[in-house]
Amino acid sequence: MATTLRAHGIRAELPNGWEGRITQLAPVMPTNAPLQRAGAAVQTEITRPFAHFANMALPPNTNAFGGGAVEQLGAEHALICLIEYSHECVGTALFSKHRLPRKLAPRDFNRRGLQRIIPGQAGSQTFLTEAGRPFCLYVVAGSYLRLGTLTRQINAVLRGIHVDPVAS
Amino acid sequence: MLIVLIIGCVVLVLATIFVTALVASYAQLERRVEQLSSADERSVPIELTTQPAAVPTGVGGASGRAAHDLSGITLGGDARTIATVGVEHTTLLAFLSSGCRTCGRFWETLRSEGPPSIGPTTRLVVLTKGPDEESPTDLRRVADGVDFIMTTEAWHDFEIPGTPFFVLVDGPTGRVAGEGTALGWDEVRNLVALGLGDASILTGVDTSAMKPSSDAERESMVDQILMDAGIFPGDPSLYPLDADAANHED
C-alpha cells in the first residue's frame, strides 16, 4: 500500500512502511535593531522547502538535515533528506554535476559522511540540480553493515520522487 | 489426689500440643510472608479496570479489520504521510476534535504534560479532520510537539463514529488490534494494554530487560563497537589463551 505525498513542487510515492513530510519553514523577520534604526533595507528571509522520508516514525520537529531523527535511527532504518537551495546555486560547479540519483550503491555511503557522526551509521551526500532546481540529497543509513538491504529500500523511494520545474 | 494429678498431666499435654501447633502455624505464616515480600514486583497481579464510556469500547485481535496509512497536512500546512501498516511498532491513533467537550480533557493534558506514556513500542498520533472543519490556529496552541496530522480521509478510512475515539494499529500485521472511546488517558492506556496484552503500560514497570531480545540487541551493539574498532569475528584478541598454552609459555 503506497502513499503519495505532494507539496512545494515535490511529489513522492512512498513504498509500504515509509512515511514522509514536505516542509517549508515560515520566513523569519530580521530583528536587528541597530540596522533597523539606521534605516537600512533589511530583507525578509527567503526559505526553501525540504522533504524527509523514513522507514521509521519521523519525530515532529526534525531539522532539515535530520537532526532529531538520526538519533533514533535503528539498524534497519534509513532517512532521506531532500533540501532545496537558493536558485542562485543553479549553474555553480557544486550543483551542476548531478541530477537526482535513482540508484545509490553501498559504496556511495561513508561512515564519516554524516552531518553528525553516530557510530554504526553511514551517510551519503549529493549536490544536484533537478528540473532546474538545486538540491542536496542527504541519506543516512542506520547501519553501515546493512547497506545492502537498506540501499534497496532507499532506491525504491528515490525512484518515486518527482520534482516539478517551479515550486507550486 | 491421683485424679487431680492425671487431669493436670492431660491439661499439660493438651497445652503443649496447642502451643506446638501455634508455633508451627506462625512459622508457616512467616515463611509465606517472606516469600511474598521477596517476590518480584512484577508478579503482583494487575487489575485491568474498565470504566463506562459514551461509546462501547471494543478490543479486537490481530485478525481485526485492515488499517490504513495516513495522509494529510500538519498544523504548519506541511504535507505529511504517516505509516501505520508494515512498520515494526504499534500506532495509537487518537481521533480528537477541537469542538467536543470530552476531547478538552485530552487536549489539556497534551498541552500541559505533553504526550502521555503508552509504552515504548507504541507511537501516539493525534488526528483531527482537515482545515475545512477545524481551526489550525486553535489547535496549534494545544498540539505543539505532538505527532499530529489533519486528515478527514482517515476518519472515513477508519469509520470513526465520533470523538474522542482511539484506534490501535498493529504495524506488522497492518490490522486494528483495538478500538474504542475513553474519558481520559488512563482509559486509553487500558485499551493499549489490553490490545497489546502488556500490563507494564499500566504499571510503568519495564520488563524489556527480561526479554531474550534485549540480549540479542546488546550482543549486536557489542559486535558493532568491536567492528568499529577493527576487531572482526575470529580475531585472536577475542579469545583468551587457554591454560595449556599459558603453561607452555611459562
Image (cartoon, coloured by chain):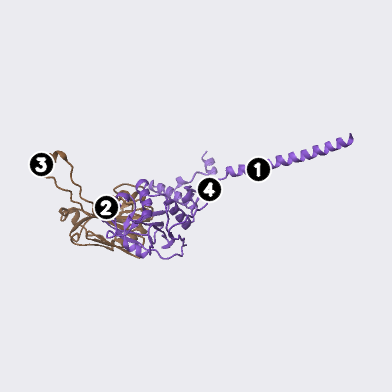
Q: CA distance from mark 1 to mark 3?
A: 88 Å
Q: Secondary structure at mark 3?
A: loop
Q: Are marks 1 and 3 on the same chain?
A: no
Q: Chain of mark 4?
A: B
Residue on which disc 3 sits = A39
Residue position marked by numbered label 2 in the rendering: B137
First of labels 2, 4 by sequence position? 4
Marks 2 & 1 on one chain: yes
Q: Residues within 10 Å of mark 4 (few under 14, many from 20)?
A: few
Q: Nearer the viewer, residue B54 or B57?
A: B54
Q: Which residue is mark 1?
A: B29
- Disc 3 from disc 2: Cα separation: 33 Å
Amino acid type, callout 2 = Thr
Badge 2, how many Cα within 10 Å: few under 14, some, many 20+? few
Of labels 2 and 4, the one closer to you: 2
> Are the residues at dot 2 and dot 4 in contact (C-beta closer than 8 Å)?
no
Q: Nearer the viewer, mark 3 or mark 2?
A: 2
Q: Are marks 1 and 3 in contact (CB under 8 Å)?
A: no
Dot 4 amino acid type:
Arg
Q: Nearer the viewer, residue B128 or B198?
A: B128
Q: Are marks 3 and 2 in contact (CB under 8 Å)?
A: no
Which residue is identified by label 4? B42
Chain coloured brown in the rendered structure = A
Q: Tell me how far mark 2 sits from mark 1, CA to CA.
A: 64 Å
Q: Categorize mark 1 by other alpha carbons within 10 Å: few (<14), some (14-19), many (20+).
A: few
Q: CA distance from mark 4 to mark 3?
A: 69 Å
Q: Amino acid at mark 3?
A: Gly
Q: Secondary structure at mark 1?
A: helix
| Residue B119 seen anywhere in this rendered image of the structure | no
Alpha carbon distance from label 1 to label 4? 22 Å
Nearer to me, B244 or B144:
B144
Q: Chain of mark 1?
A: B
